Image: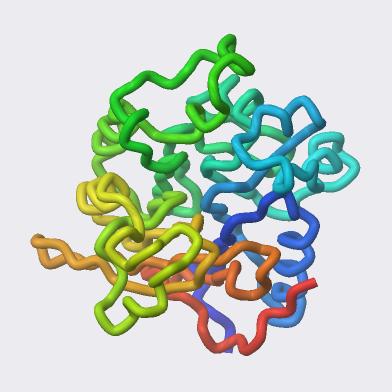
Amino acid sequence: MAPPPDTFCFAAVGDVHGRMDRMVSTLQSWAKSANRELAFVLQVGDFEPHRDEADLATMAAPARYKHLGDFAHYHQKRRRFPWPVYFIGGNHEPHGYLDTAPEGFLLTSNCRYLGRVGVVETRGLRIAGLSGIHDAPDFQKPHPALSLLGTVSNKDYACFNEQDIEQALGLERADILLVHDWPSGLVAAEDRQDFEHQRRSPHADAVGNEYARLVAEALQPRLVLCGHLHKRYRATLKWASGAESPVCCLASVEQGAEAFALFQVSRGAIQEVTHLGTLPVR
């Protein structure tokens, strides 16, 4: 039975870390096996669109994690993203490149950065994004000027600040919200043990940040997507208004299928596709 004409699918992808080819081949394999087309792809930060070694030098990361990745092939038009890709910044990005247009821009065909705070409307959905992570010492500081690259820590460019949060709160509404780090208070009591002594969560109460949750509560989206912790998790945020926001947390592409989620939109409802079996990862 054919789906209704207003039905379409989109994908969400966790931290890519420059592995664009793996992201593309995995989603193409799914689309072919499912005989479905993707309308667009949403990516939750740590995309790492490095064009060259100069971009790589502006990323905040230990040297062992600095790899050029695949993006140069797409930027040079030797390869092409098969669908529109919309991404936010994480804490590992080429800030010397992305901060040339903090309001967001088209990097190459079918690949758009939403900016430090941005919105895109497509296929009847309003998609909002908040780039970066929270760091208390930097929260009330302005973002460093690009002219200061090399004289201040690259980490200073990787955080959202108070002005970004105020701008995000002013967006009024969103159907889908992209954040890099998780909203705080997401981990259920029965899952707390799974978050103890992890790389970025020494204990469950340390998972996420209050500002991502504040923005989610203000916008009350129908779906929140996040990455950062390299861990698959599903939860629901419940608001005083009675509304609920399902949250989909994604692993990193190098970890395989848990970095990917597929959603169907039908008659305005957004639902994760969970009956596809094992997603092929190449």
Horizontal relation, residue 78 to residue 210: left or right: right
Q: Name which residue lies at 61% across and 62% down.
A: 252
Q: Residue at x 73, y 39 (%)?
A: 109
Residue 134 visible in the current orientation: yes
Residue 238 vertical position relative to residue 83 in the rendered view, above or below: below
Q: Position of residue 115 (x, y in %)?
A: 50, 33
Can the viewer see residue 219? no
Picture layout, residue 268 above or below residue 272: above
**Along the horizontal axis of the image, is 50 left or right of 241?**
right
Residue 202, position as x, y percentages in the image: 39, 63
Residue 81: x and y, percent?
75, 50
Q: Residue furthest top?
A: 147
Q: Nearer the viewer, residue 150 or 54?
A: 150
Image location of residue 274, percent across then percent down: 51, 84
Position of residue 182 relative to residue 48, above or below, is below
255 vs 188, left or right, is: right
Q: How many marks?
A: 0
Quadrant (top left/top right/bottom left/bottom right) for the N terminus: bottom right
Residue at x 46% of width, y 75% of height: 272
Most foreground residue, 112 or 249: 249
- The answer to which image quadrant residue 282 occupies is bottom right
Coloring basis for residues: rainbow
Give the farthest residue toward the left.
Answer: 240
Direction from residue 227 to residue 110 in the image, left or right = right
Residue drawn at 46 percent across, 50 percent down: 180
Name the residue nearer the viewer: 130 or 273: 130
